[in-house]
Amino acid sequence: MTVKHVLEAHLLTKTYQAADRPLTVLDAVSFQVEQGNSLAIIGPSGSGKTTLLGLCAGLDVPTSGTLSLMGFKLNNMSEDDRAYLRNQYVGFVFQNFQLLATLTALENVMVPLELRGERNVASKAKELLERVGLKDRMHHYPTQLSGGEQQRVAMARAFITSPKILFADEPTGNLDEENASHITDLLFGMNREQQTTLVLVTHNLELAKMTQRILRMKGGKLIEDTINE
Protein backbone atom coordinates (compact mmCIF):
# COMPACT_ATOMS: atom_id res chain seq x y z
CA MET A 1 0.00 0.00 0.00
CA THR A 2 1.43 3.39 -1.00
CA VAL A 3 0.29 6.70 0.47
CA LYS A 4 2.01 10.09 0.30
CA HIS A 5 1.57 10.85 3.99
CA VAL A 6 2.22 7.82 6.19
CA LEU A 7 1.13 9.85 9.19
CA GLU A 8 -1.24 12.83 9.39
CA ALA A 9 -2.08 14.55 12.68
CA HIS A 10 -4.58 17.40 12.80
CA LEU A 11 -5.15 19.41 15.98
CA LEU A 12 -4.34 16.43 18.21
CA THR A 13 -5.29 17.15 21.82
CA LYS A 14 -5.07 14.88 24.84
CA THR A 15 -6.62 15.85 28.15
CA TYR A 16 -6.68 13.85 31.39
CA GLN A 17 -8.90 14.46 34.38
CA ALA A 18 -6.67 15.36 37.31
CA ALA A 19 -7.89 15.46 40.91
CA ASP A 20 -9.81 18.70 40.61
CA ARG A 21 -9.34 19.93 37.04
CA PRO A 22 -8.62 18.74 33.51
CA LEU A 23 -4.94 18.51 32.55
CA THR A 24 -4.07 19.05 28.87
CA VAL A 25 -0.81 17.26 28.04
CA LEU A 26 -1.08 17.70 24.27
CA ASP A 27 -2.58 20.84 22.79
CA ALA A 28 -3.74 21.06 19.13
CA VAL A 29 -0.67 19.50 17.47
CA SER A 30 -0.70 19.19 13.66
CA PHE A 31 1.91 17.76 11.27
CA GLN A 32 2.36 15.29 8.40
CA VAL A 33 5.09 12.77 7.61
CA GLU A 34 5.84 11.53 4.10
CA GLN A 35 6.81 7.97 3.23
CA GLY A 36 10.49 7.26 3.86
CA ASN A 37 11.19 10.41 5.87
CA SER A 38 12.82 10.52 9.31
CA LEU A 39 11.53 12.75 12.08
CA ALA A 40 12.65 13.45 15.65
CA ILE A 41 10.39 14.78 18.42
CA ILE A 42 12.31 16.63 21.11
CA GLY A 43 11.53 18.73 24.18
CA PRO A 44 11.87 18.73 27.97
CA SER A 45 10.28 16.11 30.21
CA GLY A 46 6.54 16.67 30.41
CA SER A 47 6.36 18.42 27.06
CA GLY A 48 4.06 15.80 25.53
CA LYS A 49 6.59 13.89 23.40
CA THR A 50 5.75 10.36 24.53
CA THR A 51 2.02 11.11 24.62
CA LEU A 52 2.23 12.29 21.00
CA LEU A 53 4.17 9.17 19.98
CA GLY A 54 1.59 6.91 21.66
CA LEU A 55 -1.27 8.62 19.84
CA CYS A 56 0.52 8.45 16.48
CA ALA A 57 1.11 4.73 16.96
CA GLY A 58 -2.52 4.09 17.88
CA LEU A 59 -1.62 3.00 21.41
CA ASP A 60 -4.01 5.63 22.76
CA VAL A 61 -6.79 7.83 21.34
CA PRO A 62 -6.90 11.65 21.36
CA THR A 63 -9.46 13.65 23.28
CA SER A 64 -9.99 15.67 20.11
CA GLY A 65 -8.39 16.10 16.70
CA THR A 66 -7.84 13.51 13.98
CA LEU A 67 -5.08 11.06 13.16
CA SER A 68 -4.47 8.99 10.03
CA LEU A 69 -1.91 6.18 9.79
CA MET A 70 -1.23 4.71 6.34
CA GLY A 71 -4.39 6.43 5.15
CA PHE A 72 -6.55 4.83 7.86
CA LYS A 73 -8.33 7.15 10.30
CA LEU A 74 -7.64 5.88 13.82
CA ASN A 75 -10.20 7.94 15.75
CA ASN A 76 -13.17 5.64 15.34
CA MET A 77 -11.27 2.36 15.21
CA SER A 78 -11.73 -0.26 17.91
CA GLU A 79 -8.71 -1.28 19.97
CA ASP A 80 -8.58 -4.58 18.07
CA ASP A 81 -8.60 -2.81 14.71
CA ARG A 82 -5.81 -0.48 15.81
CA ALA A 83 -3.80 -3.49 17.00
CA TYR A 84 -4.28 -5.17 13.62
CA LEU A 85 -3.14 -2.00 11.82
CA ARG A 86 -0.02 -1.80 14.01
CA ASN A 87 0.82 -5.43 13.32
CA GLN A 88 0.56 -4.86 9.57
CA TYR A 89 2.41 -1.57 9.23
CA VAL A 90 4.20 -0.50 12.43
CA GLY A 91 7.43 -1.35 14.23
CA PHE A 92 8.45 -0.26 17.75
CA VAL A 93 11.72 0.25 19.60
CA PHE A 94 11.41 1.28 23.26
CA GLN A 95 13.87 2.62 25.81
CA ASN A 96 13.34 -0.37 28.13
CA PHE A 97 13.49 -2.98 25.32
CA GLN A 98 10.21 -4.74 26.28
CA LEU A 99 11.43 -8.22 25.43
CA LEU A 100 9.51 -11.24 26.69
CA ALA A 101 11.61 -12.72 29.51
CA THR A 102 10.49 -16.32 28.92
CA LEU A 103 11.50 -16.31 25.25
CA THR A 104 14.97 -16.52 23.72
CA ALA A 105 16.32 -13.74 21.52
CA LEU A 106 15.30 -15.73 18.44
CA GLU A 107 11.79 -16.38 19.76
CA ASN A 108 11.34 -12.70 20.67
CA VAL A 109 12.20 -11.65 17.13
CA MET A 110 9.79 -14.23 15.66
CA VAL A 111 6.78 -13.00 17.67
CA PRO A 112 5.46 -10.24 15.30
CA LEU A 113 5.32 -12.60 12.30
CA GLU A 114 3.79 -15.39 14.38
CA LEU A 115 1.08 -12.98 15.48
CA ARG A 116 0.28 -12.54 11.79
CA GLY A 117 -0.19 -16.28 11.51
CA GLU A 118 2.90 -16.75 9.36
CA ARG A 119 4.87 -19.96 9.55
CA ASN A 120 8.52 -20.91 9.05
CA VAL A 121 9.68 -17.50 10.28
CA ALA A 122 12.82 -18.67 12.11
CA SER A 123 15.09 -18.24 9.08
CA LYS A 124 14.16 -14.57 8.68
CA ALA A 125 14.59 -13.97 12.41
CA LYS A 126 18.04 -15.58 12.29
CA GLU A 127 19.06 -13.37 9.35
CA LEU A 128 18.06 -10.25 11.25
CA LEU A 129 19.86 -11.34 14.42
CA GLU A 130 22.98 -11.91 12.33
CA ARG A 131 22.46 -8.45 10.80
CA VAL A 132 22.54 -6.87 14.27
CA GLY A 133 25.59 -8.89 15.35
CA LEU A 134 23.93 -11.49 17.55
CA LYS A 135 24.60 -14.65 15.58
CA ASP A 136 26.05 -16.35 18.67
CA ARG A 137 23.41 -15.08 21.11
CA MET A 138 20.20 -16.25 19.43
CA HIS A 139 19.31 -18.83 22.06
CA HIS A 140 20.04 -16.63 25.07
CA TYR A 141 17.24 -15.21 27.20
CA PRO A 142 16.97 -11.45 27.84
CA THR A 143 18.44 -11.77 31.36
CA GLN A 144 21.53 -13.35 29.79
CA LEU A 145 22.06 -10.37 27.47
CA SER A 146 23.54 -6.94 28.10
CA GLY A 147 21.42 -3.82 27.63
CA GLY A 148 23.01 -3.16 24.25
CA GLU A 149 22.35 -6.73 23.14
CA GLN A 150 18.73 -6.55 24.30
CA GLN A 151 18.21 -3.38 22.29
CA ARG A 152 19.68 -5.08 19.22
CA VAL A 153 17.17 -7.91 19.69
CA ALA A 154 14.42 -5.30 19.94
CA MET A 155 15.71 -3.71 16.74
CA ALA A 156 15.59 -7.03 14.88
CA ARG A 157 12.07 -7.64 16.19
CA ALA A 158 10.97 -4.19 15.03
CA PHE A 159 12.24 -4.69 11.50
CA ILE A 160 11.16 -8.31 10.92
CA THR A 161 7.77 -7.23 9.54
CA SER A 162 9.39 -4.69 7.17
CA PRO A 163 7.28 -1.94 8.77
CA LYS A 164 6.12 1.06 6.79
CA ILE A 165 6.72 3.23 9.86
CA LEU A 166 8.95 2.71 12.89
CA PHE A 167 8.31 4.47 16.20
CA ALA A 168 11.32 4.70 18.53
CA ASP A 169 10.95 6.04 22.08
CA GLU A 170 14.35 7.04 23.49
CA PRO A 171 16.03 4.07 21.73
CA THR A 172 19.46 4.89 23.19
CA GLY A 173 18.25 6.24 26.55
CA ASN A 174 19.38 3.28 28.69
CA LEU A 175 22.66 2.63 26.90
CA ASP A 176 26.26 3.72 27.41
CA GLU A 177 27.92 5.84 24.74
CA GLU A 178 29.48 2.94 22.81
CA ASN A 179 26.27 0.89 22.69
CA ALA A 180 24.21 3.99 21.91
CA SER A 181 26.44 4.71 18.91
CA HIS A 182 26.11 1.13 17.67
CA ILE A 183 22.32 1.15 18.04
CA THR A 184 22.13 4.50 16.24
CA ASP A 185 24.14 3.13 13.30
CA LEU A 186 21.90 0.06 13.13
CA LEU A 187 18.70 2.08 13.40
CA PHE A 188 19.50 4.44 10.56
CA GLY A 189 21.21 1.77 8.47
CA MET A 190 18.27 -0.65 8.61
CA ASN A 191 15.88 2.24 8.15
CA ARG A 192 17.58 3.16 4.87
CA GLU A 193 17.72 -0.46 3.71
CA GLN A 194 14.00 -1.01 4.23
CA GLN A 195 12.90 2.54 3.28
CA THR A 196 10.98 2.75 6.54
CA THR A 197 9.53 6.01 7.80
CA LEU A 198 11.15 6.79 11.16
CA VAL A 199 9.58 8.77 14.01
CA LEU A 200 11.67 8.94 17.16
CA VAL A 201 11.40 10.63 20.54
CA THR A 202 14.74 11.59 22.06
CA HIS A 203 16.46 13.88 24.56
CA ASN A 204 19.66 13.47 22.52
CA LEU A 205 19.99 16.45 20.20
CA GLU A 206 22.84 14.85 18.27
CA LEU A 207 20.61 11.86 17.52
CA ALA A 208 17.77 14.19 16.53
CA LYS A 209 20.06 16.02 14.10
CA MET A 210 20.59 12.77 12.19
CA THR A 211 16.93 12.84 11.10
CA GLN A 212 15.58 14.93 8.23
CA ARG A 213 13.25 16.96 10.44
CA ILE A 214 12.83 17.96 14.09
CA LEU A 215 9.61 18.79 15.91
CA ARG A 216 10.21 20.69 19.16
CA MET A 217 7.58 20.36 21.90
CA LYS A 218 7.01 22.54 24.96
CA GLY A 219 4.11 22.48 27.38
CA GLY A 220 2.11 20.14 25.15
CA LYS A 221 2.41 22.44 22.14
CA LEU A 222 4.39 22.09 18.92
CA ILE A 223 6.54 25.22 19.00
CA GLU A 224 9.01 24.56 16.17
CA ASP A 225 9.18 22.44 13.01
CA THR A 226 12.70 22.42 11.54
CA ILE A 227 14.13 20.80 8.41
CA ASN A 228 17.69 19.55 9.01
CA GLU A 229 20.31 20.55 6.46
Image (cartoon, helix red, strand yellow):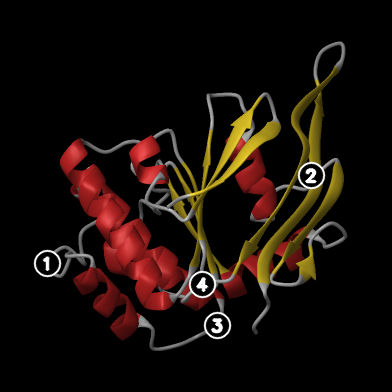
Identity of the residue drawn at 27% across and 53% down = 183
Numbered disc 3: secondary structure: loop
**How far apart are the alpha carbons under marks 3 and 1?**
27 Å
Residue 12: mark in rendering: 2
Q: Amino acid at mark 4?
A: Pro
Neighbourhood count class around disc 1 (C-alpha, 10 Å): few under 14, some 14–19, many 20 upward:
few
**How far apart are the alpha carbons under marks 1 and 2?**
45 Å
Residue indicated by mark 3: 117
Residue 212: mark in rendering: none
> Mark 2 and mark 1 in contact (Cβ < 8 Å)?
no
Q: Earlier in the sequence, mark 3 or mark 4?
A: 3
Identity of the residue drawn at 76% across and 63% down = 68
Residue indicated by mark 4: 163
* Residue 31 relative to residue 107: left or right: right
* Residue 123 relative to residue 49: left or right: left
Q: Which sits in the foreground, 12 or 21?
A: 12
Q: Amino acid at mark 2?
A: Leu
Q: Which sits in the foreground, 8 or 72?
A: 8
Residue farthest bottom in this picture? 120
Q: Position of residue 57 (x, y in %)?
A: 64, 55
**How far apart are the alpha carbons under marks 3 and 2?**
34 Å
Neighbourhood count class around disc 2 (C-alpha, 10 Å): few under 14, some 14–19, many 20 upward:
many
> Mark 4 and mark 1 in contact (Cβ < 8 Å)?
no
Numbered disc 2: secondary structure: strand
Numbered disc 4: secondary structure: loop
Identity of the residue drawn at 34% across and 59% down = 187
